[in-house]
Image: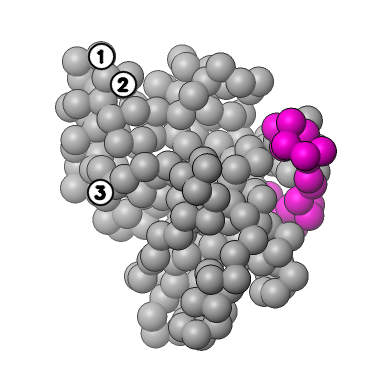
Amino acid sequence: MQYKRFILLPGFETNTYLVWDEQTKKGLLIDPAAPSEKLKSFIESEGVRLQCIVNTHGHADHIGGNEFFLKHFPCDLCVHPDDAPMLIDPNKNFSAMFEGGFVSPEATRLLKDGDLLDIGNQTLRVVHTPGHTRGGICLYTEGLLFSGDTLFDHSVGRTDLPGGSMDKLRKSIKEKLFTLPEDTVVLPGHGGTTTIEAEKVENPFCGMFS
């Protein structure tokens, strides 16, 4: 499996990931934060055929590019049902505070815990991890975890916004993510990469010494 990280919204430093199967060129786009001609051109130059766009949750800094990329690469738009209403409501996705806000197209596929996303010869499993939002999800494939705003390098997603809960976030991380192989590379929604092993030991919010 191939993947490449892009920063489309520098002010929020949101990580957008393009993931694809090298053999079939089928792929998916995770959390397109904003429109980007650069990313569009990369997708076209690599010949990647997007099967879907996945929003790990419904906050504005993770969905701002949905409309742009769906216009150029028609495919499914996927999100957990608990966060689906956020896509189309500027007050719920918190974009209302920025120049009047915006709405994303509606989701065409609702993802639940354990669902599988096939891209060619590769498969990613949906892991529902409520806490940052009610419908927050991660995507797991052997050796890699795209963790959205659930788990960061030595940190976790904020829980002080509507739908957030630190107790639920800790539970999600400890029961669903920390059970993954320790050498799993964690690719978060913001910041740099880490591993499950490092976070189990060193994360001040949910590690073994927290």
Looking at numbered disc 2 in the image, what kind of residue is underneath it? Cys
Do labels 2 and 1 touch, CB within 8 Å?
yes
Provide residue 16's location: percent of width, then percent of height.
49, 55
Separation of residues labelled 2 and 1 (CA atoms) = 6 Å
Secondary structure predominantly adopted by residues drawn in magenta: loop
Residue 206 disc label: 2
Q: Quadrant of residue 92?
A: top right
Crowd rating for badge 1 (residues with CA inside 10 Å; few <14, some 14–19, many 20+):
few
Image vertical order of residue 103 relative to residue 155, above or below: below
Q: Earlier in the sequence, mark 2 or mark 3?
A: 3
**Residues under labels 2 and 3: Cα distance?**
17 Å
Q: Quadrant of the C terminus?
A: top left
Measured Cα–Cα span from mark 3 to mark 1: 21 Å
Q: Is residue 185 above or below residue 45?
A: above
- First in sequence, mark 3 or 1: give its number: 3
- The amino acid marked with disc number 3 is Thr
- Please indicate, yes or no, whether residue 6 appears anywhere in the rendered image: yes
